[in-house]
Image (cartoon, rainbow, N blue to C red):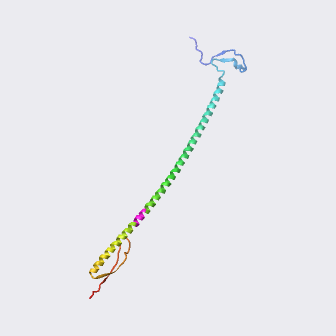
Amino acid sequence: MQPQPAPGPTMKRVTVPVGPDRTDVSSLLYFDGEDRNAEDRAKMQLMQLKEWSNQQVNEKRAREALEKEEEEAYIKQTQEMIRKRAIMQEEQDQRRREIKEAVRYKNKMMGNAKKDREAKEQLEALQEKAKFHAQAAASKKLSLIHISEPTRLGMISYAVFCLKKKKKKK
């Protein structure tokens, strides 16, 4: 059995013509699989990496700027909605105040009408009583001198009847 050569690059001597880009001594040695454009490709890859990196940075900045614009638009829209809500709330509160005032006025008018009606009914009742007492007094030989006005206009009121005994006629 023959010994196997150790893995790795194998060197062979190759005569390479010396050109303007290959003028040093090491250019005379050529390895199997050697890539003479590796340095240029590495530079190209480095440039592509820088371009890609710059593109990523620019895209990130553009994305951040767009997010910032969207956030500012959202804030502006939210503030506008809050302002409109406040205006609508104020209008609603104003309408409620007007309705309360109208109801208060209507209730006051109805209360006054009720008091007037009750006072009138009470006065009529007192006048009825006065007539009744006058008729009763006439039958008992009393005369009505005076009926005072009701003491107050309300649920409970008093009136005073002054009666005088009639003198008998002979």
Q: Residue furthest bottom?
A: 170
Residue lying at the far top in this picture: please name it: 1
Classify 9 as above or below 113: above
Report whether 18 appears left or right of 132. Answer: right
Residue 21, by quadrant, is: top right
Quadrant for the N terminus, please: top right
Would residue 12 be visible to someone looking at this image?
Answer: yes
Comparing 14 with 123, the one in front is 123
**x and y percentages locating residue 168 in the rendered image:** 27, 86
At 65% from the left edge and 29% from the top edge, which residue is drawn?
A: 47
Residue 53 on image: x %, y %:
62, 33
Q: Residue at x 37, y 68 (%)?
A: 117
- Which picture quadrant has residue 65? top right
Q: Nearer the viewer, residue 32 or 112?
A: 112
The stretch of residues the image draws in magenta is 106-112
- Left of 167 or right of it: where is 92? right
* Residue 109 among those drawn in magenta: yes
Magenta part mainly helix, strand or loop?
helix
Residue 95 % position (x, y): 47, 56
Vertical position of residue 156 compared to residue 93: above or below: below
Q: Is residue 45 above or below residue 7?
A: below
Q: How many marks?
A: 0
Could you tell me which residue is drawn at 35 percent across and 71 percent down? 122
Rendering coords of residue 107 (x, y %): 41, 63
Give the image quarter of residue 18. Answer: top right
Residue drawn at point x = 56 percent, y = 46 percent: 76
Q: Nearer the viewer, residue 97 or 68?
A: 97
Residue found at the very far front of the displayed protein: 170
Asked if one can make out residue 156 in the rendered structure from this viewpoint, the answer is no
Q: Quadrant of the C terminus?
A: bottom left
